[in-house]
Amino acid sequence: MHRLNYIFRRVLQIIPVLLLVTVLIFLLMRLIPGDPVEVMLGEKYTHEKAEVIRENLGLNKPLYVQYMIFLRNLCRLDFGNSIVYIVPVSQLLTRRIGITLLLTLMTAFFVLIISFPLGFIAAVNRNRPGDQIIRIGALVSLALPQFWIGLLLLLFFGLKLRWLPVAGWGTTWLEHLQSLILPAFTQSLATSSLIVRNLRNAIIDVLNSDYVDFARSKGLKPKVVRSRYVLRNALISTVTLFSMRITYMLSGSVVIETVFALPGIGSLLVSSILSRDYAVVQATVFVFAALVLIANLATDVFYSVLDPRVRLE
């Protein structure tokens, strides 16, 4: 019951944050140079046609009136219509959000299978060659730009070896999964580097603690000490970091989807900013913000489950 009350309070706290996000999105979009109606009409632009469209879209109204209309529609989950795609924005998001979420899930999967074994191996082989190689590899991976790594992987696995698609989304489930492998792996490298370093240091700290020495003095086998005392306590900070990095994976999809031409909401956001598609940008940023806040809430709750000493207040 206490945890449910905490979740309820946190959900209430999310509402003003989202409200602030809507204000920022709305104002920032109006500050970007360029006229969306000109983009919409293109070569057919005339002053009369532009005025008619502004009237229909409500763009000739004062800013505060436009914002109130935007907020009212948002409460009804009506994101308006895209001036570029000429369809409801909710339809665009529904088609594309699944791709971004699948990309995030596969990225998280790669992070788990890469970082946790390497972090453990580095910790138990502290200052040995294996530890040094893993630490240097993590540093190099963290220092290199993601888009550059992605382009190298595209050139090698896509163009040279032809094992995986160069770009796009494909038409079947198998092609969809193949299309996600390179972008997810690319996006996972930075987070994996951080988690390897964090997990290594956490395990070493726990191994040097008094209660682990006490467990060893009781004659417990090293395997039992590691599984019962070391891993559980070392994982607390690492799992928290991993959960927080999920929000980074969501926002990082903006770059990765553009590099690999994946039709998710990240690439939709970039193309919509370039075309001044106000409704799509506002809705996409709002959805990103909501997902990040939900991920943060899930992180806090999960942390309390992992470590009962944490009080939910």
Image (tube, helix red, strand yellow):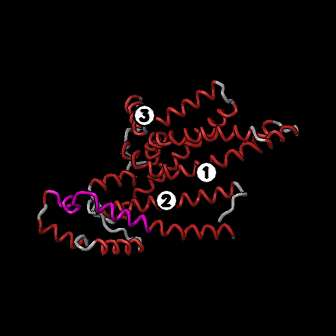
Q: Which residue is mark 1?
A: 240
Amino acid residing under circle 3: Leu
Span shown in magenta: 19-42
Mark 3–mark 1 distance (CA, rounded to whole Å): 29 Å
Label 1, residues with CA under 10 Å away: few <14, some 14-19, many ≥20: some
Query: Is 34 inside the magenta-drawn segment?
Result: yes
**SS at mark 1?**
helix
Q: Which mark is residue 291?
A: 2
Mark 1–mark 2 distance (CA, rounded to whole Å): 17 Å
x 67%, y 34%: residue: 123
The spot of residue 131 in percent (x, y) is 63, 29
x 45%, y 39%: residue: 182
Amino acid residing under circle 2: Leu
Q: Which residue is mark 3?
A: 153
Note whether residue 62 is visible. Answer: yes
Amino acid residing under circle 1: Thr
Note whether residue 169 is visible. Answer: no
The spot of residue 186 in percent (x, y) is 46, 39
Quadrant of image for the C terminus? bottom right
Q: Which of label 1 and label 2 is nearer to you?
A: 1
